[in-house]
Amino acid sequence: MNGKLMQSAIRALRLGSCSQLQASAARITVRAYATPPKRFYKKTSVLSSDAGYEVVLDHRKLKTPKGTPFVVRSEPLAIAVATEFDAQKEHIERSRMHLSALCFTAIDNPNNLTKLDMVNYLLNFIPTDTVLFQYDDEKDLQDLQLNEWDPVIAWFNQRYETNLQKTLNITPPQVSEQDKMKIAKHLHSYSLDTLHGFIFAVDTLKSIILACAVIERMLPVEKAVALARLEEEYQLKFWGRVEWAHDLSQQELQARLAAAVLYVHLNCSEYFVKQKSVL
């Protein structure tokens, strides 16, 4: 009798466990991700109008997410955006179309930012700039920062006639109002649209010093990203590197920064292209 009772109890436990597993499985929520939109056009082109330059997908004029007609003042910028759309395969991967995203943001201006808002946003990055925070407790890292970051800080101070100083502890560096005014004056010399590119670059590098250096062609894109990741790369020597993850992160930063730099340069008047009429 005891043996039969034991078998019955085991059978009941198994059935109960199966029921609980089925109930748990029924409660599991399957997360569904939106499928990227399919490419609906065959070719892209650029159309010149009185307002500027537009991108045409087959016979449809490109519009922003808000439905505003896509119009830019720079022909090379319009060509670059058309090239991004033309490079899409079966689906449109919007997360990889950084130039298009920058143009959409500048045209729609979803947060209704003014030039003053954007300049103040950039100025607020100075006290937390990556290259101004250095360490003195690890000699190898300190030497690396001294050799790699200090020349860029010196260049920035000479270029903009400022006196930014690094800090060796968690206390933010002191930035004088005079230095802020000099940097603000330089930023105000750019158009509202162009400042979107500056913000994209600064957000990517977490450094207004490195962003200005790469935009002013003092540093190439790859070097600027490497300097922004200096501490991380130093730590990876000790803790190991996940190649696919860290390499992907580095390439993504380079793509974002390259788009920001290209956007700034193509928005400058010296890069506009005006076709002469042939009589």
Image (cartoon, grey):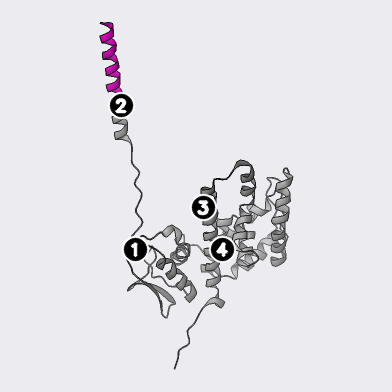
Say few, some or many: other residues with alpha carbon within 10 Å of mark 3 (under 14 / 14 to 19 / 20 or more).
few
SS at mark 3 in the image: helix
Relative vertical location of residue 100 with respect to residue 237 in this rendering, above or below: below
Q: Secondary structure at mark 4?
A: helix
Q: In this orientation, which residue lies closer to the viewer: 136 or 117?
A: 136
First reached walking from the N terminus: tag 3 or tag 4 = 4
Measure how far apart labels 3 and 2 are at the Cα level.
41 Å
- Magenta-highlighted residues: 1-18
Q: Which residue is mark 2?
A: 20
Closer to the chain start, of discs 1 and 2, is: 2
**Amino acid found under the numbered disc labelled 1:** Arg
- Label 2, residues with CA under 10 Å away: few <14, some 14-19, many ≥20: few
* Quadrant hosting residue 64: bottom left
The x and y percentages for residue 31 are 35, 44
Residue beneath disc 3? 248
Q: Quadrant of the C terminus?
A: bottom left
Q: Is residue 139 above or below residue 84?
A: above
Instruction: Give the CA distance from mark 2 to mark 4.
Output: 55 Å
Residue 198 badge:
4
Question: Callout 1 environment at 10 Å: few (<14), some (14 to 19), or many (20+)?
Answer: some
Upstream in sequence: badge 3 or badge 2: 2
* Sequence-first tag of 4 and 1: 1
Amino acid type, label 2: Gln
Locate residue 41: give its quadrant.
bottom left
Q: In this orientation, does residue 74 appear?
A: no
